[in-house]
Amino acid sequence: MNPAGTDDTNNNNNTNLNTNNHCPNCAPKRPHSTSPPPALTNHPASPSYYSSFASSSRPIKLRNLLTKEVTVDSLHLKNTNRPVGCRETSCLGSIIDPVPVEHRVRTPDETRAQAKEFIDGYYASIKRFDTPAHKNRLLEIEEQINTTDTYYLRETELIYGAKLAWRNAPRCIGRIQWSKLQVFDARCTRTADEMFEAICNHIKYATNKGNLRSAITIFPQRVKSTQNDWRVWNPQLIGYAGYKDKETGKVIGDPLNVDLTEICQKLGWQGKGGQFD
């Protein structure tokens, strides 16, 4: 078969095609290159385009393509050395748990460094950085760490930290509401009954008869001197029970909650054995 726009005579005689013909199909066809295209280091899709930001010590200008508005971002300058999983050539943003969380008690040196970073950010947010109150607070925290290996946040600092953590959570699609987060301070909790009451208050406030509100309840922190952690065993405050038939192995209800349902039954809870208990 002949290429479109050529004739048998020209092909058989291996003569040049008519370059004066303006038909696009008559243009000489070059063979496809087998070599990879050159790297576009200045293109937004290039990994080096973004990696250059990480090593940059200057703010980054961000341009909104719709409104043409230009804003300046300097958050990357406050980056820490904590691992995030992503690299120059790979993005793990779609993975739920890219970096496993290590549940352990921090050393006093780690606590001091992170406490200073946090308190500096708090006082900068209220425009009181490097004031006498800021310096006195750092000295107070240093004394607490030297005595107890930990320190305790004031309520205003706790609220700031909770909102900041939600704002910086990259996988949460609802974090646009971070500034409206209601923080319930339950650090004075001492018994399981008090913890249960705090959880019930949390559910009542957050559900709000169907008009949901953002809320977080914070229980006592982990300390080195005790092994008693305040934990909620179930992954969600409200869920469906799961019943497993020991003979057939069939599960009625939520399979994820089979183990938790058995624990609750041993503690005295009895469901109806239905699909949505």
Image: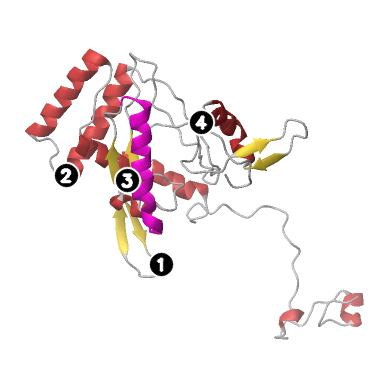
* Kind of residue at disc 2: Ile
Q: Position of residue 35 (x, y in %)?
A: 69, 52
Looking at the rendering, the stretch of residues picked out in magenta corresponds to: 190-211
| Mark 4 secondary-structure assignment | loop
| Mark 2 secondary-structure assignment | loop
Say which of 187 and 127 sits in front: 187
The numbered mark at residue 88 is none
**Which residue corresponds to mark 4?**
100
**Which residue corresponds to mark 1?**
65
* Kind of residue at disc 3: Leu
Q: Position of residue 153 (x, y in %)?
A: 23, 30
C-alpha span from label 3 to label 4: 24 Å
Horizontal arrangement in the rendering, residue 213 relative to residue 21 (left or right): left
Count neighbours of disc 2 (C-alpha within 10 A) and say few if under 14, some if 14 to 19, many if 20 or more: few
Horizontal arrangement in the rendering, residue 120 relative to residue 205 (left or right): left
Query: Could you tell me which residue is drawn at 82 percent across and 80 percent down?
Result: 4
Sequence-wise, the earlier of marks 3 and 4 is 3
**Which residue corresponds to mark 3?**
75
Tell me whether the residue at label 4 lies in contact with that at label 1, contact meaning CB atoms closer than 8 angstroms: no
| Mark 1 secondary-structure assignment | loop
Tell me whether the residue at label 3 lies in contact with that at label 4, contact meaning CB atoms closer than 8 angstroms: no
Sequence-wise, the earlier of marks 3 and 1 is 1
Say which of 225 and 188 sits in front: 188
* Kind of residue at disc 1: Leu
Q: Examine the rendered structure and indicate whether residue 162 appears above or below residue 138.
A: below
**Which residue corresponds to mark 2?**
126
Query: Could you tell me which residue is drawn at 73 percent across and 54 percent down?
Result: 34
- Of tags 3 and 4, which is closer to the observer? 4
Sequence-wise, the earlier of marks 2 and 3 is 3
